[in-house]
Image (cartoon, rainbow, N blue to C red):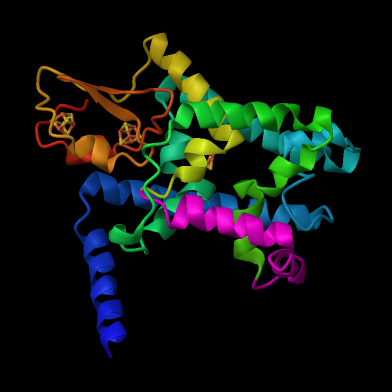
Amino acid sequence: MISLSIIKYETMNIINKFKNLGRAAKIRYATIILGIILFLPPLSLLPQFFGESRFCGTWCMRMYMNNPSSYMMFATFMGMTLAALVFAVTFFFGRLWCGRLCPIGGTSEIASKLVPDKIKIDYSKIPAPAVRYGYFLVFLVAPAVGIGTLCCKLCNFSTVPQLFTAPFNAGSMAFFFTTTGMLSASLFILLGVWSKGGRGYCNFMCPVGAVASLVNGLGAKLGFRRYMIENAKCTGCGACSSACPVWAISQDKDVVKISQFSCISCGKCKDVCPKGAVK
Ligand code: SF4
Ligand code: SF4
Ligand code: SF4
């Protein structure tokens, strides 16, 4: 009886959370859902068309480089084209793909809304750039030292599409009963669904995110438009840094600033700032 009332209370909390979102946030969630509808089916179904149970070995250029074969060329070309497009947009306009469209980060962020805030894991004390670029280095050199598939096994671009296809595809379902599959699913839960902000995987482990963050930082240095804080208007209340899903905002005495090497251009800081200090 008690647990039922807790479930009811938490469900109402979740519904209210979505209801109380501002217009910009509602539009952002709508574009993320659009990204899931547009991009997840090809990520999930195309590999099966090419005789693979998952994304690896078809769209993923890393696997293609290890084992090139012409029948996979089309899918890999599509993957490379999409990646080039993502990085070009990121350079000029910020990480619109990551913050507003990507079905992988988007799924984990939306799913994280279903978990009550008070039991979420807060990773904000971990220095994300050090972990991100350290892991990315491992991701790059792993094939040369013979552990190439280790990072692939933990990749959410493989895990999330399979979560969606598992109810309809025996291969995907079987994957989640293997040690690797259980590890991947646990990672998705711990760094995504159960994490504050739902973007732990994006911030620590995503190879696309690691490159995008560098491209974003470079674009910012060359003067392209990014989210910035006007310190003349800012009171240092900290609302923006609490809302940031990738803990990109830091405060040093009176100066609050956004790290362009972590920001995913989601705009949450702008939505919550009571002083209109984020532009
Ligand atoms: S960091 Fe990776 S998983 Fe996260 S939104 Fe960007 S591309 Fe998607
Ligand atoms: S700094 Fe602002 S725009 Fe960038 S990720 Fe954090 S909340 Fe989103
Ligand atoms: S929410 Fe606005 S006023 Fe508060 S610290 Fe952030 S930028 Fe400054």
User: Residue at (44%, 18%) from the top-left corner?
Assistant: 217
- 222 versus 259 height, above or below: above
Q: Position of residue 134 (x, y in %)?
A: 59, 27
Front residue (pair 198, 124): 124
Q: Position of residue 114 (x, y in %)?
A: 37, 64
Q: Position of residue 248 (x, y in %)?
A: 35, 30
Left or right, 95 with reference to 143: left
Left or right, 129 with reference to 225: right
Q: Quadrant of residue 277?
A: top left
Q: Quadrant of residue 270?
A: top left
* Quadrant of the picture in which ligand 2 is shown: top left
Where are the magenta residues, as a range? 167-196
Front residue (pair 24, 212): 212
- 2 versus 89 height, above or below: below
**Magenta stretch: helix, strand or loop mostly:** helix
One can see residue 11 in this view: yes
User: Residue at (71%, 48%) from the top-left corner?
Assistant: 153
User: Residue at (73%, 63%) from the top-left corner?
Assistant: 175
Count of picture labels: 0
